[in-house]
């Protein structure tokens, strides 16, 4: 049996002005390919965002390459280990935003909330005067969240500003604490809320991932697991692999109980999407799953649409 080198997963983001982002794309992709790095990196004029995986040497070298740009010299990353490759390929994409809110003029380099270190987070959210808000999508919140957090029940981050307008009042809730997977959504969310007149806006530095990494289990106020946008699906305390799998019909996390449902079919559907699948989509999913199984029998990895489903970047 061939012994694999250990794999490491690094999540990175930074809001910084990159007007030449288009020119950065090809050299960065070439460097990643040369080092055997897989995953997705997003480049925009407002910065960089992404999650990548590779060997210890590969990750160290690509991070050094990124930080060799003076604008990214202080680029931070969050790291965890993976037993299996969490991505099938490498992509470097150009975007209008590195995390899409869709509100013009929101610039976290100009206006941003107060960072709170994971070690200080419990004290802040235990204050009854603080409104605790989960800025993630509904399926992410369903996997785990902080006790007492408000769930906006949004399906995309674009819906967050409208939820704030309809449900929160700066006069009644001047102190707000927010959190997300890796911190990037909170950067924009806090800038937006400050723009809307909220007096004190805090967000968890490094996001849930840094909290789970740094805060001991016996002190943790986190409930459940944390959904991540790669093949691991979810992680727990200490960033240990979680217990969820991904439905490749709808890309939602599913539990062992949901897999026992008659509406679950591997690679095709789960209770979340079974009733919404058209005949055409079901047939396509069945054919895709057939190819996955054939590839597995040959000892190969199928990297068709199955790979695309999990390779999303939000943080």
Image (cartoon, rainbow, N blue to C red):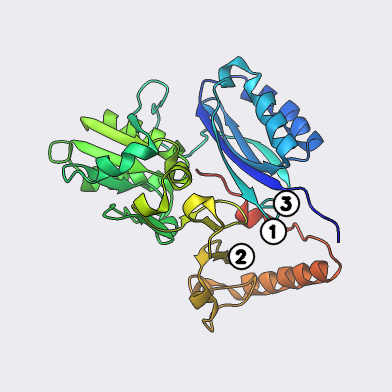
Residue bearing mark 1 = 305
Position of 97 compared to 308: left or right? left
Tell which of 98 and 246 is nearer to you: 246
Q: Is residue 101 visible?
A: no
Image location (x, y in percent) of residue 73: 58, 19
> How many angstroms separate mark 3 from mark 1 (CA)?
11 Å
Please report the residue visible at 23 percent of the width from the left and 31 percent of the height from the top: 200
Element class at badge 3 = loop
The residue that mark 2 highlights is 248
* Disc number placed over residue 19 in the picture, else none: none
**Local crowd size for mark 3, using a 10 Å CA cut-off: few (<14), some (14–19), many (≥20):** many
Marks 3 & 1, CB-CB < 8 Å contact: no
| Residue sitting at x 51%, y 81% | 261
Q: Give how far across and how far down residue 109 sits, in percent.
A: 42, 22
In the rendered structure, the answer to whether residue 65 lies left or right of residue 154 reads: right
Residue 248 x %, y %: 61, 65
Within the image, what quadrant is residue 168 found in? top left
Q: For this view, does 155 lie left or right of residue 5?
A: left
Q: Which of the two discs, 2 and 1, labels the residue nearer the N terminus?
A: 2
Q: Nearer the viewer, residue 119 or 166?
A: 119
Residue bearing the label numbered 3: 88
> Could you tell me if residue 295 is visible in this image?
yes
Pointer 3 or 2: first along the chain:
3
Q: How far apart are marks 3 and 2 (CA)?
A: 15 Å
In this view, the mark in front (3 or 1):
3
Marks 1 and 2: in contact by CB < 8 Å? yes
| Residue drawn at (74%, 36%) of the image | 58
Sequence order check, earlier mark of 3 and 1: 3
Camera-near label (3 vs 2) is 3
Q: Is residue 49 above or below residue 314?
A: above
Above/below status of 17 relative to 193: above
């Amino acid at each position: 049996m061939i012994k694999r080198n250990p794999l490491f997963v690094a999540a990175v983001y930074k809001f910084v002005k990159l007007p030449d982002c288009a020119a950065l794309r090809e050299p960065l992709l070439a460097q990643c390919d040369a080092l055997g790095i897989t995953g997705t990196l997003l480049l925009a004029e407002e910065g960089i965002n992404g999650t990548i995986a590779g060997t210890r040497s590969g990750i160290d070298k690509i991070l050094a390459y990124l930080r060799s740009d003076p604008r990214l010299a202080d680029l931070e990353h969050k790291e965890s280990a993976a037993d299996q490759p969490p991505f099938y390929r490498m992509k470097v994409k150009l975007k209008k935003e590195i995390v899409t809110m869709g509100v013009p003029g929101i610039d976290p380099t100009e206006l941003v909330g107060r960072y709170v270190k994971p070690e200080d987070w419990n004290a802040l959210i235990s204050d009854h005067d603080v409104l605790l808000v989960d800025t993630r999508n509904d399926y992410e919140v369903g996997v785990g969240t902080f006790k007492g957090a408000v769930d906006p029940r949004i399906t995309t981050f674009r819906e967050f500003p409208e939820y704030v307008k309809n449900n929160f009042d700066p006069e009644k809730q001047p102190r707000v604490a927010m959190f997300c997977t890796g911190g990037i959504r909170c950067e924009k969310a806090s800038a937006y809320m400050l723009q809307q007149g909220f007096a004190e806006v805090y967000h968890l530095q490094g996001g849930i991932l840094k909290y789970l990494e740094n805060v001991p289990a016996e002190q943790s106020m986190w409930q459940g697991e944390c959904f991540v946008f790669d093949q691991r699906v979810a992680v727990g305390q200490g960033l240990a692999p979680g217990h969820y799998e991904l439905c490749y019909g709808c890309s939602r996390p599913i539990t062992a109980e949901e897999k026992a449902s008659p509406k679950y079919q591997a690679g095709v559907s789960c209770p979340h999407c079974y009733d919404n699948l058209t005949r055409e989509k079901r047939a396509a999913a069945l054919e895709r799953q057939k190819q996955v199984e054939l590839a597995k029998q040959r000892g190969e990895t199928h990297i068709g649409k199955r790979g695309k489903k999990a390779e999303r970047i939000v943080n």
